[in-house]
Image (tube, rainbow, N blue to C red):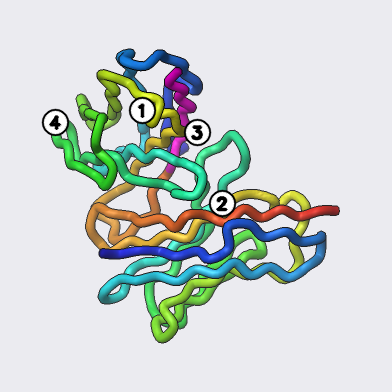
Amino acid sequence: GDSVTQTEGQVALSEEDFLTIHCNYSASGYPALFWYVQYPGEGPQFLFRASRDKEKGSSRGFEATYDKGTTSFHLRKASVQESDSAVYYCALGTGGYKVVFGSGTRLLVSP
Amino acid sequence: EAAVTQSPRNKVTVTGGNVTLSCRQTNSHNYMYWYRQDTGHGLRLIHYSYGAGNLQIGDVPDGYKATRTTQEDFFLLLELASPSQTSLYFCASRDGSINNQAPLFGEGTRLSVL
């Protein structure tokens, strides 16, 4: 079945560091890919999506590019801030009812 | 403004207890979902619905019932709660007529089963 793999359970950075959170997926065809962010005590918030090969999604300084060749949608940010500390989820939708989420990556940014 | 509202925000019950979690969306979305969130497992789909009176089984349905009474309201029922159901529960909604629209989530309900 369809699945999303986030290899890092936790990433610890300092302010102004470059961020990469890895996301790989397994699905047939061209699924839509999403990134969500979740702050403590809140529900997941949609960041952005991409739905075709080489499409870039972006929001709030975060970006990711849909790569069908490597089945990846890695999240990147050039310079993180302490306020970016949160849990980040990669997810995919295949056009039906289902949206499949990865296990999440906790980002800790120290000042 | 699009919104998904869950109640209660926190709930404590005992093993064998009866619990109902409520979710209301004001987005005119047809799809509604119940997820549970646990460390190391991310978000796992319990049940979902694509309209009033409709119910579909998700990936982890054991021990849960759900009911969609109106377009806006979706309930999750635990009739014999067990400690393994201690978790953070999220409701979400989306417009199924928009291809691959991202779900919109509520704030969550933290349930503890003692």
Q: Which residue is mark 2?
A: A37
Question: Looking at the magenta stretch, what is its main secondary structure?
Answer: strand
Q: Quadrant of residue B15?
A: top left
The residues tagged by marks 2 and 1 sit, at their Cα atoms, a distance apart of: 21 Å
**Chain of the residue where label 4 is placed in the rendered structure:** B
* Residue type, numbered disc 4: Gly
Judging by the rendered image, the residue that carries numbered circle 1 is B23
Q: State the extent of the magenta-drawn residues as a range.
A: B105-114
Instruction: Work out whether residue A40 or residue B42 is closer to the camera in this orientation and state it.
Output: B42
Residue most toward the left?
A: B53
Disc 1 is attached to a residue of which chain?
B
Identify the amino acid type marked 1. Answer: Cys
Is A75 covered by the magenta stretch? Answer: no
Mark identifier at residue B12 = none
Question: What is the crowding at mark 4: few (fewer than 14 residues within 10 Å), some, or many (at least 20)?
Answer: few
The first of marks 3 and 4 along the sequence is 4
Report which residue position mark 3 lands on: B107
Tell me the distance, in whole angstroms, between the alpha carbons under discs 2 and 4: 32 Å
